[in-house]
Image (tube, grey):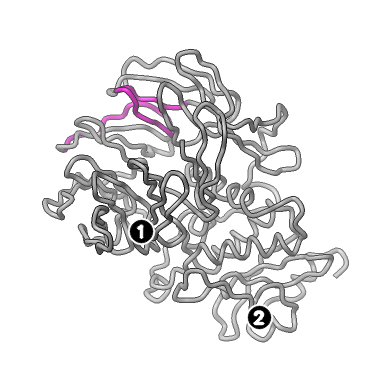
Amino acid sequence: MYQAAVAVFLYKVNQSGGDKKRLLSTPARMLNVQGDWLYFLGSNEICEIRVDGSELTQLAVANYTTQLFVMNNWLLYNAEDGIYRLQLDRPGALPIRIADNSNIDQFTVSHDWIYYKEHRKDEQPGIIGKIRINGLDNTSYGPLDYEDLTLQGDYLYFTYNDENTAKIGRMPVEGGSLQSLHNASGYNIADNKLYYDAGPTLFQSELDGSGSQEVASLGDWPMPFRMNLLDGSVYYEKGLFGPDNQFVSAMYAVNLSSNSAYSLYGKILPEEYVYEFSLFAGAYQSSLPAKDPKIEYETQQAAKAVIEQTILPEMSTRDKVKALHDYVVLNTAYDYDNYLNGTIPDVSYTEYGILVLHTGVCQGYAVTMKMLLDLAGVENYYISGTNNAGAGHAWNIVVVDGVYYHLDATWDDPVPNEPGYIGYTYFLIPDEEMALSHIWDRETVKGFFANP
């Protein structure tokens, strides 16, 4: 079993709960295994690596990729200008664009067809469509606000929202009406059965939604929005906030025949946990859209992963700030084209844009830094002001060893994006230096501290 979360390290874990081996110490997600090779999306590129951790190779640059599939000898992925395919058995082959469409952010592949989601602006529902892998016969099914597209048999399965209720639905691949199956936010299909979660319980039904029955109890912790089923077991992550408001998690599995759960590699969560605490309550004020639990969950998972993989107990406060600053700069591209065109989407102002989509503008950088610094236990504040030209801007105040400093991760990230580059011009600098390029209400900042 290969394990990775959004922008975290890559591990190989024995399915029976045995050894855990790190294969890669850089971000890895969207894992695809074929034979002895593992294909994945790194920070800004698509890579391959042998399953033993050797022969890491970059295959293509991918700044805006959100989906990645391997089918036979083809690797298919989306980019900022459409869907591409890359022939894997031809070293040095160049990617071929299949679909010329900048709005495709999710797709799945079956036989000779690609089934995709085309998002729309101005809060309009997305479009479900399909296109052959040779780029021909592009067809639209019509508008629908959906996620997690899967093809099984003659139907497309997905999750969608209906008046703020998360549901699982399906639609015939040849076109037809939407069929609502269950109220649930996550699902998986295995052995011609549909599995879905309802709170801490896993249910199974026929593919048409009939014959629902409880098959496993997963404990008191919330389920993820997607789960993995393999060889008669369901694999999932439990997560909770402890009394110190620090998020911890562990990977578990449940055998469906015996309903017996076990930790994958020995990490077990404590018995005591806090139900009511939310990452988006208290000192941290989220900029995420209200009533969108899926986005909130994915953002929580991404933030938790960053903390787990970048913050060590022995770090000083300055080291923690630097680690989080570097992570955000390295893994984010400023949404420059939309900025120039005056078409910045709402998501670019949020933590979800930075941590999950890896793009955003200054507010997104600043609220994300605050979110991560809060989780790391570092005193910090969100600041809004202007640059010297009078344009609105946002950054952070960070307290290190009792002294406050300014931190502007946005201006430390080059525009256009330069993968691997980190600037430190605006990293932990005093008022006098910041005032050369930024304007803010100094009395407001002094008010943050009991003894300014």
Residue at the image point whose x is 57% and y is 62% from the top: 328
Q: Give the residue type that dot 1 points to.
A: Asp
Q: Quadrant of residue 351?
A: bottom right
Q: Give the residue type that dot 2 points to.
A: Ile
Residue at mark 2 to residue at mark 1: CA–CA distance: 32 Å
Q: Secondary structure at mark 1?
A: loop
Q: Is residue 184 magenta?
A: yes
Compared with 186, 356 (above or below) is below
**Tag count in the figure?**
2
Magenta region, mostly helix, strand or loop? strand
Q: Secondary structure at mark 2?
A: strand
Residue at the image point whose x is 43% and y is 44% from the top: 51
Q: Is residue 182 left or right of residue 425?
A: left
Q: Earlier in the sequence, mark 2 or mark 1?
A: 1
* Position in image of residue 408 (x %, y %): 62, 72
The image quadrant where one finds the C terminus is: bottom right
Residue at the image point whose x is 64% and y is 36% from the top: 240
Residue that badge 1 annotates: 122
Q: Quadrant of residue 379?
A: bottom right
Mark number displayed over residue 48 = none
Residue that badge 2 annotates: 439
Decide: marks 2, 1 in contact (CB < 8 A)?
Answer: no
Give the farthest residue toward the left: 137
Q: Is residue 327 magenta?
A: no
Foreground pick, 399 / 306:
306
Q: Is residue 87 left or right of residue 438?
A: left
* Position in image of residue 365 (x %, y %): 56, 64
Foreground pick, 342 / 263:
263
* Span colored in magenta: 175-197
* Position in image of residue 170 (x %, y %): 27, 33
Q: Quadrant of residue 41?
A: bottom left
Give the farthest residue toward the right: 451
